[in-house]
Structures are given as structure tokens and as C-alpha cells.
Image (spheres, rainbow, N blue to C red):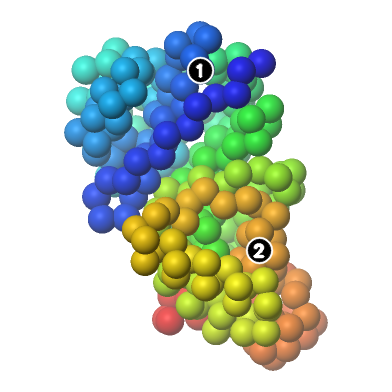
Amino acid sequence: MATLEVFQFPYMSDNYGVLLHNKDTLETALIDAGDASAALGALELHGWSLTHLLLTHHHSDHIAGMHEIKSQTHCKCYGPQGIDGVDKVLSGGDSFVFADSEVQVLHTPGHTMDMLNFYLPDQSLAFTGDTLFTLGCGRLFEGDAATMWESLSKLIALPPNTWIYGSHEYTQANAKFALSVDPNNKALQQRAKQIDQLRAENKPTVPSKLSDELETNPFLRPDDADIRTLLKMPSEPDEAVFAEIRKRKDNF
């Protein structure tokens, strides 16, 4: 089975789109469609023809360019219910084949209630939209903390060697917050320095390994004793600790 080529490109102020390409089948998928010019330019740069468009959720910075992209490429669009122009409506638990690779669909509501994430187990890739970011997680615009924690728990259960592609470059701000609730985490301290260096060189901090997120992302670690001690929540359920971390981030 061919290893997919992955090309991540920035658009707008802090979004990322991603192209996946199989050099044998010549199939190409785009994750999210917030900026048609950026996506079409990335395709032209590589000389790839778009066959699949995968949408994570309905926010405009993820779908604003979809109609133009479909018109220009004649690709088939996959995404959640309720988005005009989706050809194949997906739900959590669905799966389909792209370029000889299985794509598993995870429903991860919280940021929005329609949020879908795409996991390719044989490629060790997960596209987590605005659910899981490097050192962060999405704001709770439509769901509550309990819903988001359940969604994040699905991602925590993926193999630790999975590469996590979140949709935004929020990592420097996330690192500063993470240190405020987990200041003694040496792995986090080191990672924050590495992130500052990457951004100083205008390099992306996305993707990240799930193993690193499990070690340093406070939103995935509400069971951590040091975090619980700082929050004065020694025996509360993980869901409650996560809710407090999310509340603090909102006000950071």
C-alpha cells in the first residue's frame, strides 16, 4: 500500500488546509475548503487533480470555498449533514476508501455539533478539524464540556503514533496557557521552547504526534495529579476537571 503524500498549506490568518495524494492511483483529497484560491493554488503547485473534498464542519473558514473548488475540479464532496453541496453525507461510525486507504469517520461534537474527524489507520493520520489542536482543543460554541470531553476521549484512544492535523496555528498561545495549569511538566516546558523556535522561523507547529499531546496537552490530561492539585480538584471526575481547564482557557 502506498504511503500518501501530505501537503499542508496555510490560508486566512491561521487556518491550515491539507492535500493527500496517492501517486499510484492519482487520487487527491482536500481536507476543508475555507479558501478556494489557496486550495487550487496548492493543487496547481503539485500538478494534482482533486478527486475528494472532505469537510469537517460548517463554519465558514472551513467551507467558504467549497462551491468554487467543486466547480473547478469536479471532485466529490464528503461531509456532515446540513451543508449545501455535500455529495456524500457522513456520520460517526461511517467509513469509506480513499486511494486504497480506509477513512474512518469520527463524530466529535463540542466545537460544533456536526464536527467530523477523519482517521486513516493504515497511514497513521487523523484530521481533527477544530476538535483537537496542538496543545489545545476547540472552543465550545455549540456543545458543552461533557460533550467535548467524550469527543476528545475518542481521539485519546487512537494509537499514540498517530499524526494529529488540527486546522489552526494556535500553538504558541496554547503553550502559554498549558504552562499556566501544568507549570512543572518538563516535557511541556521543552516543547514550548521548541514551538517558540518554530514560530520564530515561521514554520508550522502542525501536525503533532498524539503521543506528545498525551504528554503535554492539558485538555487530554484531566486525570493528571499535578494539574488536579493546581486546580484544587483532587477527586472530581475527569469531565469536571476538563470543564475547568476549558473555562480557564476561555478567560486566559
Q: Which picture quadrant has residue 237?
A: bottom right
Q: Is residue 36 left or right of residue 145?
A: left
Residue 178 in the image, given as x and y percentages of width and height: 55, 75
Q: Is residue 66 above or below residue 185?
A: above
Residue 100 visible here: yes
Amino acid type of the residue that numbered disc 2 sits on in the rendered structure: Leu
> Would you say the residues marked 2 and 1 are in contact, meaning their CB atoms lie under 8 Å apart?
no
Q: Which mark is residue 150?
A: none
Q: Is residue 74 left or right of residue 199?
A: left
**Real-space Cα separation, disc 2 to disc 1, in angstroms:** 32 Å
Q: Which mark is residue 22?
A: 1
Report the residue at 51% width, 9% height from top: 25
Q: Nearer the viewer, residue 235 or 212?
A: 212
Q: Nearer the viewer, residue 60 or 6?
A: 6
Report the residue at 21% width, 17% height from top: 72
Q: Is residue 78 above or below residue 205?
A: above
Residue 233 in the image, given as x and y percentages of width and height: 71, 85
Report the residue at 65% width, 52% height from top: 210
Q: Is residue 227 left or right of residue 134?
A: right
Secondary structure beneath dot 2 equals helix
Residue 3 in the image, given as x and y percentages of width and height: 60, 24
Amino acid type of the residue that numbered disc 1 sits on in the rendered structure: Asn
Q: How many marks?
A: 2
Report the residue at 60% width, 77% height from top: 189
Where does the C terminus fall, quadrant-wise? bottom left
Q: Which picture quadrant has residue 211?
A: bottom right
Q: Residues within 10 Å of mark 1 (few under 14, many from 20)?
A: many
Q: Is residue 129 above or below residue 7?
A: below
Mark with earlier residue (2, 1):
1
Q: Which mark is residue 220?
A: 2
Q: Is residue 212 above or below residue 244?
A: above
